[in-house]
Amino acid sequence: MNADLKDILFLDIETVSCVDQYGKLSERLKTQWARKANFFKREENQTDEDLFHERAGIYAEFGKIIVIAIGKYTEENGVLGLRTKYFADHDENKLLTEFRAALEKMGPGVRLCAHNGKEFDFPYLCRRSLVNGIPLPSVLNMAGKKPWEVGHLDTMEMWKFGDYKHYTSLDLLAAIFNIPTSKGVMDGSMVSKVYYQEGDLKKIAEYCVGDVVGIAQLYLKMKGLDLINEKSIIPA
């Protein structure tokens, strides 16, 4: 296997607000949300409650993780493949504990890769782990490490080429590189509704796995390599 492809763990997380109804927040958290919401642009008559349902899930202080999907390259008879897996649970503590155990089994050489991972996935995982009283796995613990000692890769950062202002979605990059998608009709804006109104955690998990496949395929394109054949993408 190409050395650039070894020991990379691709990941994506799905998050929602910490409670399904704004009224279930403690008074203390309502006060803190009101302070945060003061910095948001509002539409006319948009309340703190409206903003909570719309935006709370993207902030680790007011959200929780419900799915973590991962993927790792494999090679069999010289053919590159991808093996995927997901962790999904209503109990965030259980979810993060299982994910931490899986990371630790992979050893210190593993490198994490996500799309916008340095700005979102990696810090969100760290923050929610600490909130849940779970020690950070070594690959996520950056304390005392020099920048070059942190094994984090980010396909969005790779696409920036040093442009600090440039945000490009995974879906757009998948489109321009003609990367097939298996995410179905769902998109990120629907996660909260599917979770709290439909209760379909499996649907969200499958969507999340689709993103992991997209990230792994995009990484290959960034390295000037061919895409993995869909037949060689294997769910765990």
Image: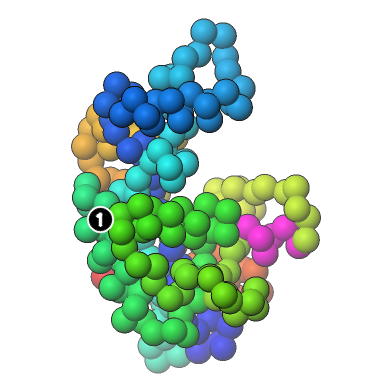
Residue at the image position 47 percent from the left and 70 percent from the top: 141
Q: Which residue is mark 1?
A: 93
From the viewer's perspective, is residue 205 above or below residue 35?
below
The x and y percentages for residue 92 are 27, 52
Residue at the image position 53 percent from the left and 81 percent from the top: 5
Q: Which residues are magenta?
A: 156-161
The x and y percentages for residue 178 are 58, 57
Q: Main secondary structure of the magenta part?
A: helix
Please say whether residue 191 is visible from this viewpoint. no
Q: Is residue 14 rendered magenta in the image?
A: no
The scheme the figure's colours follow is rainbow
Instruction: Say which amino acid is labelled 1.
Output: Asn
Whether residue 100 sits left or right of residue 142 in the image: it is: left
Whether residue 114 sits left or right of residue 147 in the image: it is: left
The x and y percentages for residue 85 are 30, 66
Kind of element beneath mark 1: helix
Residue at the image position 73 percent from the left and 49 percent from the top: 166
Residue at the image position 31 percent from the left and 81 percent from the top: 105
